[in-house]
Image (cartoon, helix red, strand yellow):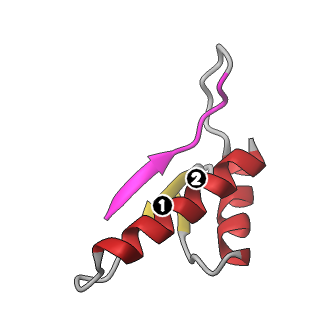
């Protein structure tokens, strides 16, 4: 498992739970299921299966990158 923390990109650097929630919703629309965690829902959890392949990871990262670009 790995977590990606979403924070306000400005000087405050505060937890950005709205971005985390929007990001996982955008990923779900593309078929990538992720979870948020933390008290502010600002950490996106990646929990791939043990038998995940490199092409599957590359596809998932592409979906994540596109969703992040659309939600920022």
Near-viewer residue (17 or 4): 4
Give the quarter of the image for residue 2: bottom left
- In which quadrant will I find the C terminus? top right
The x, y position of residue 24, in whole percent, is 65, 65
Question: Which residue shows up at 48% across the image and 70% down it?
Answer: 59
Examine the rendering and report whether any part of residue 41 can be seen: no
Examine the rendering and report whether any part of residue 48 can be seen: yes
Question: Which residue shows up at 58% across the image and 53% down it?
Answer: 65
Q: Is residue 11 above or below residue 68?
A: above
Element at label 1:
helix
Please indicate whether residue 4 sits to the left or right of residue 70 in the image.
Answer: left
Near-viewer residue (10 or 53): 53
Q: Which residue is mark 2?
A: 65
The x, y position of residue 19, in whole percent, is 71, 48
Question: Which residue shows up at 65% across the image and 13% down it?
Answer: 11
Q: Which residue is mark 1?
A: 61
Give the quarter of the image for residue 31: bottom right
In magenta, the rendered stretch is 1-9
Q: Is residue 50 above or below residue 68?
A: below
As for residue 3 lying within the magenta part, the answer is yes
Q: Seen from this angle, which residue lies furthest left? A: 50
Element at label 2:
helix
Please indicate whether residue 59 sits to the left or right of residue 21 in the image.
Answer: left
- In which quadrant will I find the N terminus? bottom left
């Amino acid at each position: 498992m790995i977590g990606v923390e979403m924070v306000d990109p400005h000087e405050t650097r505060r937890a950005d739970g709205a971005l985390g929630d929007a990001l996982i919703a955008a990923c779900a629309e593309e078929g990538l299921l992720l979870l948020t965690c933390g008290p502010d829902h600002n950490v996106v959890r990646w929990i791939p299966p043990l038998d995940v392949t490199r092409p599957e990871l590359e596809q998932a990262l592409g979906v994540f990158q596109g969703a992040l670009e659309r939600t920022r």
